[in-house]
Amino acid sequence: LGYLYLANGNETYLAMALDMAEATLAHMTTTDGILTESCCMDTDDCTCNHDGKIFKGIWTRHARHLADSANSAVSLSNRVAALRSALSANAEAVWTRDRDPLTNYTGVAWQGPFVAPDEGGDGQCVTQVRPPNK
């Protein structure tokens, strides 16, 4: 939807994309707004398959693109600012709660604590390294 907005300037596409992003943040986060999967709420017993483990990274990449695409949408600026804030909070959580300070490896549970990484850990966090454009 962000690409459709960029192609034709119709802010309705951005509003729909923000609706979806806000729904994800309302239903797939911890109480402090950190993205998580229902299969990985308990970091001692994360039962997610590979797709589940990489969901947050894929979602974050596209949410960041949405925030960057919406820079010129003045009428949606409060909603875009909230999305940017959520992205920043998740990036901070990855770095402070879900990273091994000795290796800088990250795990799959952004809410912490750090759990040894696997195929879903570091790859999903790469999208969090760069904050969204302001």
Image (tube, helix red, strand yellow):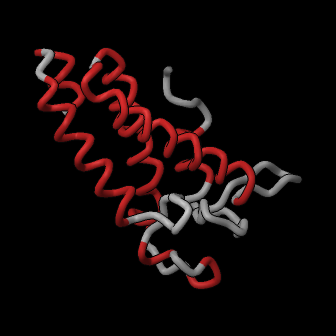
Q: Where is residue 21 shown, x and y percent of the image?
A: 31, 48
Q: Is 36 in front, or is 44?
A: 36
Q: In which quarter of the image is residue 24?
A: bottom left
Above/below status of 48 relative to 65: below
Residue at image coords 68%, 55%:
106
Q: Which residue lies furthest to the right in this view?
A: 102
Q: Where is residue 127 shown, x and y percent of the image?
A: 52, 39
Q: Which residue lies furthest to the bottom in this view?
A: 45
- Is residue 17 shown left or right of residue 68? left
Residue at image coords 12%, 31%:
12
Quadrant placement of the N terminus? top left
Q: Count of labels shown?
A: 0
Q: Where is residue 25 shown, x and y percent of the image?
A: 39, 56
Q: Where is residue 93 shown, x and y percent of the image?
A: 65, 53
Above/below status of 113 relative to 120: below
Q: Is 114 in front, or is 105?
A: 114
Q: In which quarter of the image is residue 32?
A: bottom right
Above/below status of 110 relative to 16: below
Residue at image coords 19%, 36%:
15
Residue at image coords 33%, 32%:
66
- Is residue 89 shown left or right of residue 66? right
